[in-house]
Amino acid sequence: MLVVRRFLHIFKLPDRRKEYFARKLVGFSNIQMYKVVADVKNYRKFVPFCTKSKILTKEPNLLTANLEVGFPPIIENYTSTVSLCEPELVQAICRDGRLFNVLETNWRFHPGLKSNPQTCIVDFHINFEFKSALYSKVATFFFDQLVQQMEAAFIKEAQRRYGRESLPVHHLEPVRS
């Protein structure tokens, strides 16, 4: 019986749904961080593995964007609806269903230290499920590193745009909604 269990475990399909929560105190204002995250059309310039970012439709607080992600030979694209609420929230939801069953990202920006207006608290949450079992398996091995690398790219872009941060990043206990 033990041999059968081990054998079945080896061939068990990975859980396709992945979630990541992070909360950080950063040395940029909530308006500055909001502007970096809301700048979807320029993701191709600073987000790892994003090779194209195109705005398809744009309204005052809503846009539709097509992103191409991956690294050769695996490159995929998807379309997301992005809700914008300056300077508090950027939420992207993929509904096109070609690459993901589910893809939701939420960035929330809160004022930081009262003594330092050039700080904010950033809550980041990503929830996704690939359609492909192969992509899910690959994501199992690299998920945390890829998401953290992506998250760090936004801080690095804020540094490029606004200069040195007013304080180093402090990791806080994430709020899970």
Image (tube, rainbow, N blue to C red):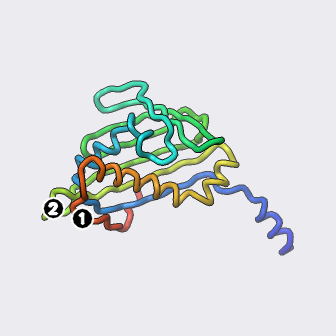
Image quadrant where one finds the C terminus: bottom left
Q: Earlier in the sequence, mark 1 or mark 2?
A: 2
For marks 1 and 2, give the CA distance. Answer: 9 Å
Give yes or no for contact between labels 1 and 2 (Cβ–Cβ under 8 Å).
yes
Q: Position of residue 90 (x, y in %)?
A: 35, 43
Q: Position of residue 172 (x, y in %)?
A: 34, 67
Question: What residue is shown with label 2?
Answer: 116
Query: Image height check: is 144 above or below 58?
Result: below
Left-right relation of 17 to 80: right
Residue at position x 55%, y 32% from top? 96
Left-right relation of 131 to 151: right
SS for callout 2: loop
Q: Position of residue 99 (x, y in %)?
A: 60, 39
Residue 167 numbered mark, or none? 1
Left-right relation of 133 to 3: left
Residue at position x 72%, y 55% from top? 13
Residue at position x 46%, y 58% from top? 148
Query: Image height check: is 6 above or below 116?
Result: below
